Amino acid sequence: MSDFACKECHLLLQENNCPRCVDSEISREWQGFVEVLNPEKSEIAKEMGIKTPGRYALRVR
Ligand SMILES: [Zn+2]
């Protein structure tokens, strides 16, 4: 399980930095996640503005 989530793109991370966002804030305080396999066909991905497959936290504090 991932320990960290990016506050910028909500991507779940194993490490304390996000490969997609430069200088983004990383949080350990996140709740729930969604696995997006096909962003074009996923309603939640559209709602969250996700364009790349991956695991994303639903809420990041
Ligand atoms: Zn990010």
Image (spheres, grey):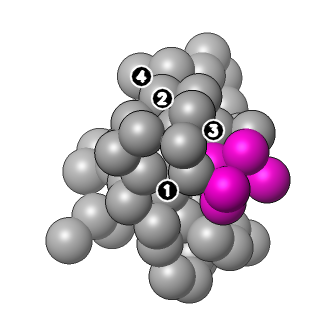
Residue situated furthest bottom in the rendering: 31
Q: Quadrant of residue 50?
A: top right
Q: Are marks 1 and 3 in contact (CB under 8 Å)?
A: yes
**Magenta extent:** 43-47
Q: Residue at x 20, y 71 (%)?
A: 1
Label 1 or label 2, whichever lies nearer to me, is 2
Which circle's residue, 4 or 2, is located before the other in the chain? 4
Depth check: give the residue in front, 23 or 37. 37
In 3D space, how far apart are the residues under numbered discs 4 and 2 (Cα atoms)?
Answer: 12 Å
Depth check: give the residue in front, 39 or 12. 39
Label 4 or label 1, whichever lies nearer to me, is 1
- Find disc 1 in the rendering and name its residue: 56
- Find disc 4 in the rendering and name its residue: 19
Relative to 21, say whether 59 is above or below: below
Does residue 12 appear left or right of residue 47 in this picture? left
Q: Residue at x 68, y 73 (%)?
A: 59
Q: What's the mark number on residue 50? A: 3
Q: Residue at x 28, y 64 (%)?
A: 2
Mark 4 C-beta closer than 8 Å to ligand 1: yes
The answer, for residue 4, to whether it is visible in the render is no
Label 4 or label 2, whichever lies nearer to me, is 2
Relative to 40, say whether 29 is above or below: below
Which circle's residue, 3 or 4, is located before the other in the chain? 4
Amino acid type at circle 1 is: Tyr
